[in-house]
Image (cartoon, rainbow, N blue to C red):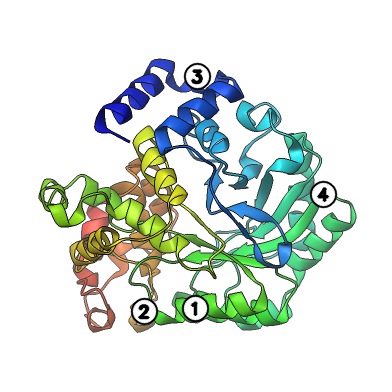
């Protein structure tokens, strides 16, 4: 696609506006989406034991309302956090599709506190989903997802409240499949995400899991993906684009990216193709808030073969992230005598710097029990960071931004 064609697509998108795109017909949307990303539909992969064939890029209910119709037209058929939609707010682009052609996920949180301190409560989870189904007007959700996941393998073995809530709802035809998104909990003395997911893939009713995964991540994540492939356990990568948003705003980075060795690629497009190249990864959820991000990410997913320019772009991003961008591996957390959820703090920094969503970042940061001010500057964490971040200094910096 030429530069002029991209500008024409963008101008048409701007001309229509968010309301116009949301109200456009399926045919009009398909034409605009096809022009933007070069035609075709997103390829699909089996989502593990669920048996669902889902698009390699999955959507989220908190995406821009103007992007969702284009994503639907391009073949995005799985939607994360769909409980945010009611019968009145469900995107028209989805309402126009046969219900069996797309999959909706209801996300279920702990109650009585946040994901660190809340509790699993079978009855409350059951009632929450039942009410969400009623409000949606759709009759059922395809996937029941335990948000943030278990604190430890021990909790997964002994606390079956979330699974029992799912089983009750499934008997009533209100949900069909069981999954979870899993975080690390070494700040609570618990286990790492890959340890918990590895256990669940082999020993539980869970059919799929979602977790942090990005270029340059720890080898344990690759080992988890290989296990998931053997066990037919579905996998969705999240928080994949560390540093991409801030690099896009950095003139020095953009000047380097303009060199011929990167021609035809960008860090975001290269990341999408790198994720798609892993046959054990079912899909990835990638933030998309603008027409440009849609065009870049979905266009890359349509053409998954990685080239040398993609590898160069990822190498450039990796070098840029050194000492600057946390990849959320949580390796430093085990060293912190104050038990600060460092990865949570730096995840909220991503919302501000990479997603340009400062209000959300500050809201989430304000809810932390321990924030950047809890750091005593002991330095125990510094040597543990594989990305050479001065963790203590960065905690102070993030507090100045979000506190």
Circle number at residue 19? 3
Q: Which residue is mark 2?
A: 331
| Label number found at residue 192 | 1
Residue 13 in view in this figure: yes
> Which label lies toward us, 4 or 3?
3
Q: Residue furthest right?
A: 171
Instruction: Place residue 8 in its image quadrant.
Output: top left
5 left or right of 100 in image: left
Can the viewer see residue 403 in this picture? no
Mark 4, residue position: 174
Q: Of callouts 1 and 2, which one flags the residue occurring earlier in the amino acid sequence?
A: 1
Of discs 1 and 3, which sits in the foreground? Answer: 3
Mark 1 or mark 3: whose residue is earlier in sequence: 3
Mark 4 Cα within 10 Å, few/some/many (few <14, many 20+)? Answer: many
Neighbor class of circle 1 (other Cα within 10 Å; few <14, some 14-19, many 20+) is many
Quick one: 337 or 23, which is closer to the camera? Answer: 23
């Amino acid at each position: 696609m030429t530069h002029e064609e991209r500008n024409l697509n963008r101008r048409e998108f701007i001309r229509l506006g968010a309301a116009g795109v949301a109200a456009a017909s399926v045919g009009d949307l398909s034409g605009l989406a096809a022009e933007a990303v070069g035609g075709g539909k997103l390829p699909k992969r089996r989502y593990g034991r669920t048996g669902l064939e889902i698009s390699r890029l999955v959507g989220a209910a908190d995406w821009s309302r103007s992007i969702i119709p284009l994503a639907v037209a391009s073949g995005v058929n799985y939607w994360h956090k769909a409980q945010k939609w009611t019968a009145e707010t469900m995107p028209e682009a989805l309402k126009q599709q046969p219900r069996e052609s797309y999959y909706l996920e209801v996300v279920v949180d702990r109650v009585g506190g946040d994901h660190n301190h809340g509790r699993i409560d079978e009855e409350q989870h059951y009632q929450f989903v039942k009410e969400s189904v009623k409000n949606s007007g759709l009759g059922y959700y395809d996937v029941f997802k335990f948000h943030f996941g278990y604190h430890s393998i021990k909790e997964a073995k002994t606390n079956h409240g979330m699974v029992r809530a799912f089983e009750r709802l499934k008997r009533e035809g209100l949900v069909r499949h069981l999954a979870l998104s899993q975080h690390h909990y070494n700040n609570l003395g618990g286990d790492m995400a890959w340890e918990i997911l590895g256990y669940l893939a082999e020993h539980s009713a869970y059919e799929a899991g979602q977790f942090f995964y990005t270029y340059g991540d720890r080898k344990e994540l690759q080992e988890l993906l290989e296990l998931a492939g053997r066990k037919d356990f579905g996998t969705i990568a999240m928080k994949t684009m560390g540093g991409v948003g801030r690099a896009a705003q950095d003139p020095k980075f953009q000047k380097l990216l303009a060199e011929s060795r990167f021609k035809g690629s960008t860090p975001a497009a290269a990341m999408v193709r790198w994720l798609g190249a892993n046959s054990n990864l079912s899909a990835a959820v990638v933030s998309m808030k603008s027409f440009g991000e849609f065009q870049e990410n979905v266009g890359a997913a349509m053409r998954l073969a990685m080239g040398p320019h993609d590898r160069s772009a990822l190498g450039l991003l990796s070098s840029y992230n050194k000492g600057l961008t946390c990849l959320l591996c949580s390796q430093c957390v085990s060293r912190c005598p104050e038990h600060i959820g460092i990865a949570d703090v730096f995840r909220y920094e991503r919302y501000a710097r990479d997603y340009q969503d400062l209000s959300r970042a500050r809201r989430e940061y304000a809810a932390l029990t321990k924030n950047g001010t809890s750091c005593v500057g002991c330095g125990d964490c510094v040597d543990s960071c594989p990305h050479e971040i001065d963790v203590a200094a960065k905690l102070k910096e993030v507090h100045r931004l979000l506190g």
